[in-house]
């Protein structure tokens, strides 16, 4: 948790004295710390909603689209309410929160109206505030004023209640959600952040493990432990432990499960204490949210895409540095920085992440070249020792698999997850469930079938797609499209970075060198690797008839045939040929596109679900932010701009509608087949981000990122339509001058083709090629003509871009 007090974190301000009242500032959309945190008087200079909302002005030309307020008062001065906070909160929740869940949603049966006194009448005149959206916004604002700022009375702009929902969600992501998801680990908060709700019941003491290569950090945390013990003698003492030189032995990691703890990550050195002791401050990072309160691997990459757009490159730079630290000391980018993740990684995105950050800091920081060099050195080591070495590398196919080491049952899973798997074995050995788990984990009981089950289970968790029927009971035997696309991107990024930034010669320092590998890296080596991987993927994974890439079973030596949206990762990485990309858009895209975006898999591949075969969260009908982001970017890479815009529109609309109708909710995953209540997903551990009272404070990391990233893809006309919550089909009908009958005919034809209202701007059979011909080509990042042809072949366009890219460099 950040050592800085978060203005929207109720726990951070519990000692703050209540203020009698606060006047609203001139800007009705100011961040909450400015809007509520300043008790000075302000005179609002705002005139009308459209005049003082720069977001709307940017999106519109002559006409403003905005959400209608409760009343249209005469004159040009917008309404401002004077509100007694606690009294209004009590009345509001008593009337409107009829199911008593701490939220006001369309599921509540209240009158959907409350009267508020106006400031201009000195409280004598009242206006109605009507509708779920405005009432839920009122609840959110009052909750912040009460819980965070301890205010008895406030002045509240009506514009803050009927705010354009796209603007409101974007603003909250930028000003509040990112800040509340920000953490750092150091002495100021170690007792709090060391706690882990995922392993409750084990040794509860706060504990941190420090790698042997960071002795000053160990000295620092030892001092912090002593200081905390003196300050809080009746509380458990911080347990500081050193890791061995190789902390990834599976049996060692298993034994750490009895004493779980945080793993130290990068810190920034400060001046020594007066006693000459080392002092540090933790570098910040962003967590996913919900039960996931650590530095996660591929979540961090996705979050970076949004953070850069929202002007937070320093935070992204710190996250890259954390990953470099992890590779240097733990041998990989960890699933997350907890001891039970020491053997497990996640999909590798470091090179693209580092290049994007570098593109934002290169003109601002003198040491940006050193930052990029360290990131590439770390990525090269990660490539060698994690992904192209045993056990993850398959020497026959020359592709890579998710195959982390490990022993026993993963301790971080929800308590009931493995009950149905382990109970029969416990009965077989005539043991209690708990006793059997203990004996099995210590390998005092041999169950080869169970060993095989957990080999695949650990693989699924390393893939980030935990869980899916695509991977269940087979994951460790699969060279997946997603992993090998990421590694192709590693190879391409490393090649072009060596060529363009390091004079085509990168010397590997001793601390980064891998035994048996060259001490000097050149671009040609990495281009050759990329070319070979692309050929292998084409030979073993590509299916022309189906028009998509399939995971390859290295044991059975065959494609799985499981239809997964990860096929589009090959387009994101640039591993697909232009012809393959066009075929994927024509044949594969309609299978996955639904009302709110792309499903993780097709219903056909997932199969029937029920009590005996429950739904998995990474399967149909659910859609996930990373899959949307990578598909959008891949479509843009190959020139299918209209398809990318349509898919982004669908996703943003779905997120916006759930945000409006359900008290500002932003969740980890959505059911993209539902037109209402898409956030209501009950699979495995439920849906993170939905459990709040009053109002959301964090959203969910990669969904936050997908929202702001997607807004960079849709055009201005689409933004205007989204601001008034226009469904895709209504927008499509209006912009194509179709009659209702014509639109319905196209919709029905699309559904017959299994596309669920695919409806692009042209018939499905033609739109893949038509879209390509109407878009400018887009460039592969930092890739010159010769290097491009060597890797991709002469036929493929060299240009590519993505949201957030500066015009000066290549895209990523």
Image: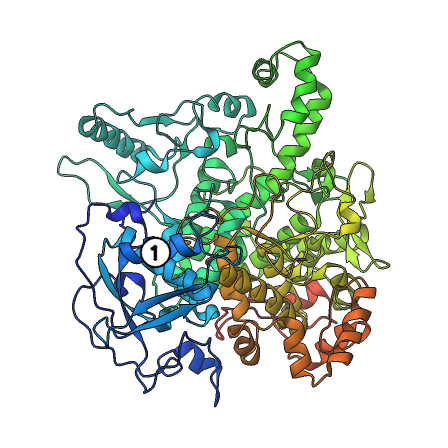
- Give the camera-side residue of 5 and 381: 5
Pick whichever, 468 or 454, lies toward us: 468
Q: Quadrant of the C terminus?
A: bottom right
- Observer able to see residue 403: no
Judged left or right of residue 672, residue 191 is left
The quarter of the image holding the N terminus is top left
Q: Tell me which residue sits at (52%, 29%) in the image.
A: 248
Q: Position of residue 757 (x, y in %)?
A: 73, 67
| Percent coordinates x, y for residue 730 in the rendering | 65, 76
Seen at 34% across and 63% down, the residue is 365
- The part of the image, by quadrant, that contains residue 751 is bottom right
Which residue is farthest top?
A: 430
Q: How many numbered markers are drawn?
A: 1
Provide the secondary structure element on which disc 1 rests.
Answer: helix
Q: Which residue is mark 1?
A: 91
Residue 708 is situated, as x and y percent measured from the top left of the image, at 49, 65
């Amino acid at each position: 948790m950040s050592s800085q007090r978060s203005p929207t974190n109720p726990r951070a301000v519990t000692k703050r004295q209540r203020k009698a009242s606060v006047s609203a500032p001139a800007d009705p959309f100011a961040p909450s710390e400015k809007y509520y945190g300043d008790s000075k008087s302000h005179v609002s200079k705002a005139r009308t909603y459209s005049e003082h909302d720069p977001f709307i002005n940017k999106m519109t030309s002559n006409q403003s689209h905005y959400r209608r307020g409760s009343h249209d008062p005469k004159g040009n001065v917008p309404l401002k309410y004077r509100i007694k906070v606690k009294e209004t909160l009590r009345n509001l929740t008593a009337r409107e929160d009829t199911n008593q869940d701490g939220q006001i949603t369309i599921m509540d049966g209240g009158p959907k109206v409350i009267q508020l006194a106006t400031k201009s009448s000195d409280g004598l005149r009242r206006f109605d505030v009507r509708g779920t959206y405005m009432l839920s916004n009122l609840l959110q604002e009052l909750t912040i004023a009460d819980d965070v700022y301890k205010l008895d009375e406030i002045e509240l702009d009506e514009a803050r209640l009927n705010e354009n929902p796209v603007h409101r969600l974007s603003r909250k992501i930028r000003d509040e959600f990112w800040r509340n998801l920000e953490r750092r680990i150091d002495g100021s908060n170690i007792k709090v952040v060391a706690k882990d709700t995922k392993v409750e019941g084990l040794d509860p003491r706060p504990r941190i493990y420090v790698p042997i290569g960071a002795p000053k950090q160990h000295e620092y945390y030892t001092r912090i432990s002593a200081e905390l013990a003196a300050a809080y003698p009746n509380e458990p003492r911080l347990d500081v432990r050193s890791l061995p030189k190789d902390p990834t032995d599976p049996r060692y990691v298993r034994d750490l499960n009895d004493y779980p703890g945080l793993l130290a990550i990068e810190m920034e050195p400060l001046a020594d204490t007066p006693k000459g002791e080392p002092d540090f401050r933790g570098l910040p990072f962003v967590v996913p949210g919900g039960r996931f309160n650590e530095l996660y691997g591929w979540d961090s990459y996705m979050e970076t895409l949004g953070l850069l757009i929202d002007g937070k490159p320093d935070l992204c730079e710190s996250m890259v540095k954390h990953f470099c630290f992890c590779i240097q000391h733990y041998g990989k980018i960890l699933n997350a920085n907890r001891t039970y993740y020491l053997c497990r990684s996640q999909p590798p995105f470091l090179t693209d992440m580092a290049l994007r950050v570098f593109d934002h800091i290169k003109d601002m920081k003198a040491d940006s070249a050193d930052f990029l060099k360290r990131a590439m050195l770390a990525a090269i080591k990660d490539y060698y020792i994690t992904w192209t070495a045993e056990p993850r590398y398959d020497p026959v196919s020359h592709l890579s698999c998710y195959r982390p080491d490990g022993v026993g049952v993963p301790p971080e899973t929800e308590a009931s997850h493995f009950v149905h798997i382990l109970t029969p074995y416990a009965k077989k050995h005539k043991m209690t469930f708990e006793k059997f788990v203990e004996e099995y984990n210590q390998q005092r009981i041999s169950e080869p079938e169970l060993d095989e089950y957990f080999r695949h289970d650990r693989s699924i968790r390393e893939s980030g797609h935990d869980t899916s029927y695509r991977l269940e009971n087979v994951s460790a035997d699969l060279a997946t499209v997603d992993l090998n696309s990421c590694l192709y991107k590693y190879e391409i990024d490393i090649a072009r970075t060596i060529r363009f930034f390091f004079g085509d010669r990168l010397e590997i320092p001793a601390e980064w060198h891998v035994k048996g590998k060259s001490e000097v890296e050149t671009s040609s080596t990495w281009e050759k690797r990329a070319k070979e991987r692309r050929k292998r993927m084409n030979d073993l994974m590509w299916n022309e008839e189906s028009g998509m890439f399939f995971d390859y079973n290295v044991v059975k030596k065959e494609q799985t045939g499981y239809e997964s949206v990860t096929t589009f990762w090959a387009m994101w990485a640039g591993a697909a040929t232009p012809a393959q990309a066009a075929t994927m858009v024509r044949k594969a895209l309609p299978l996955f596109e639904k009302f709110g975006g792309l499903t993780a898999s097709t219903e056909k591949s997932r199969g029937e679900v029920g009590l005996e075969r429950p739904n998995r969260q990474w399967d149909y009908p659910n859609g996930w932010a990373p899959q949307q982001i990578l598909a959008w970017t891949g479509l843009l890479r190959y020139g299918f701009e209209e398809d990318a815009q349509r898919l982004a529109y669908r996703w943003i609309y779905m997120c916006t509608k759930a945000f409006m109708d359900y008290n500002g909710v932003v969740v980890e995953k959505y059911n993209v087949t539902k037109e209402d209540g898409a956030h209501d997903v009950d699979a495995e551990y439920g849906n993170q981000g939905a459990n709040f009272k009053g109002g959301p404070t964090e959203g969910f990391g990669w969904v936050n990122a997908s929202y702001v990233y997607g807004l960079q893809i849709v055009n201005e006309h689409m933004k205007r339509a989204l601001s008034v919550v226009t469904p895709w089909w209504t927008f499509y009908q209006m912009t194509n001058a179709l009659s209702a009958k014509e639109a319905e005919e196209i919709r029905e034809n699309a559904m017959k083709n299994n596309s669920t209202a695919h409806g692009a701007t042209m018939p499905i059979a033609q739109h893949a090629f038509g879209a390509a011909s109407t878009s400018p080509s887009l460039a592969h990042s930092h890739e010159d003509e010769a290097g491009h042809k060597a890797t991709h072949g002469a036929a493929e366009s060299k240009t590519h871009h993505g949201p957030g890219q500066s015009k000066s460099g290549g895209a990523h």
